[in-house]
Amino acid sequence: AQTVTQSQPEMSVQEAETVTLSCTYDTSESNYYLFWYKQPPSRQMILVIRQEAYKQQNATENRFSVNFQKAAKSFSLKISDSQLGDTAMYFCAFMNVLGGATNKLIFGTGTLLAVQP
Amino acid sequence: EPEVTQTPSHQVTQMGQEVILRCVPISNHLYFYWYRQILGQKVEFLVSFYNNEISEKSEIFDDQFSVERPDGSNFTLKIRSTKLEDSAMYFCASSTEGRRGYTFGSGTRLTVV
């Protein structure tokens, strides 16, 4: 069974600084998808970034980028130029591409990020 | 931008009562999901629904739970006889193709007293 581990329960960063959130996962599959979701105090789950395992290039979305290390099964999220609005819980999630009609997400336990003014 | 709409945002119910949580997925989406998040814990998969039937359900999704797509727009989660441990945030999500990531609703906070 696949598992997702986020070893940092809480992190703090100064506004405008860069922060990296860690995520590791365990799977025997070679093709899959990885996601980072953001959950602000409003509790809504918002997709931040997505990575396809068969693509070597790291995904980037504006200030958000990932460092995907397939051999190490590591998928970290880097937030550049942190803003107060980035304060949220961040969840790493795994999806098996062979899930077919299921496509269920397996979530980590989350990292609570606080951006300090 | 299209949204997944969930109602109500907060529901309080007595133990043993039936509740129905409602969701309106994005109109051209084909895959529908329910997840739950017990306060302070991780988000857990409950059930996925495609082509008018359940495609997968978790161990949490026992006989007390059911899902339905009664018309072309709504997607509901029913809990037949609520327990205290059903208190959680319930998220509905939908997607055109799950591997591109879902759109989640803003959740229904269910409190069982």
Image: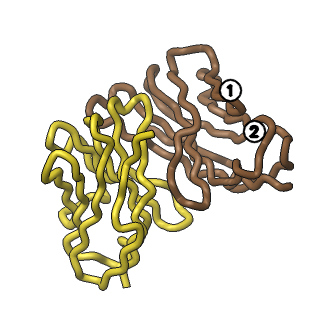
Chain colours: A brown, B yellow
Above or below for A16 versus B59: above
Q: Residue at x 32, y 81 (%)?
A: B13
Secondary structure found at label 1 = strand
Q: Residue at x 84, y 47 (%)?
A: A15
User: In x, y percent, where is residue A19?
Assistant: 78, 40
- Crowd tier of the residue under label 1, counting other residues whose Cα lies within 10 Å: few below 14, some 14–19, many 20 or above: some
Question: Amino acid type of disc 1?
Answer: Asn
- The label shown at residue A110 is none
Q: Nearer the viewer, residue B11 or A98?
A: B11
- Callout 1: chain: A
- Callout 2: chain: A
Residue A40 in view in this figure: yes
Q: Which residue is mark 2?
A: A20
Disc 1 and disc 2 in contact, CB within 8 angstroms: yes
User: In x, y percent, where is residue B98?
Assistant: 36, 33
Above or below for B90 versus B73: below
Secondary structure found at label 2 = strand
For the C terminus of chain B, which image quadrant? bottom left
- Left or right relative to A117: residue A2: left
Residue A1 in view in this figure: no
Q: Nearer the viewer, residue B106 or B100?
A: B106
Question: Amino acid type of disc 2?
Answer: Thr
User: In x, y percent, where is residue A73?
Assistant: 59, 29
Q: Are marks 1 and 2 on the same chain?
A: yes
Q: Earlier in the sequence, mark 1 or mark 2?
A: 2
- Crowd tier of the residue under label 2, counting other residues whose Cα lies within 10 Å: few below 14, some 14–19, many 20 or above: some
Give residue B83's quadrant in the image: bottom left
Between the residue at mark 1 and the residue at mark 2, the CA separation in whole angstroms equals 9 Å
- The label shown at residue A67 is 1
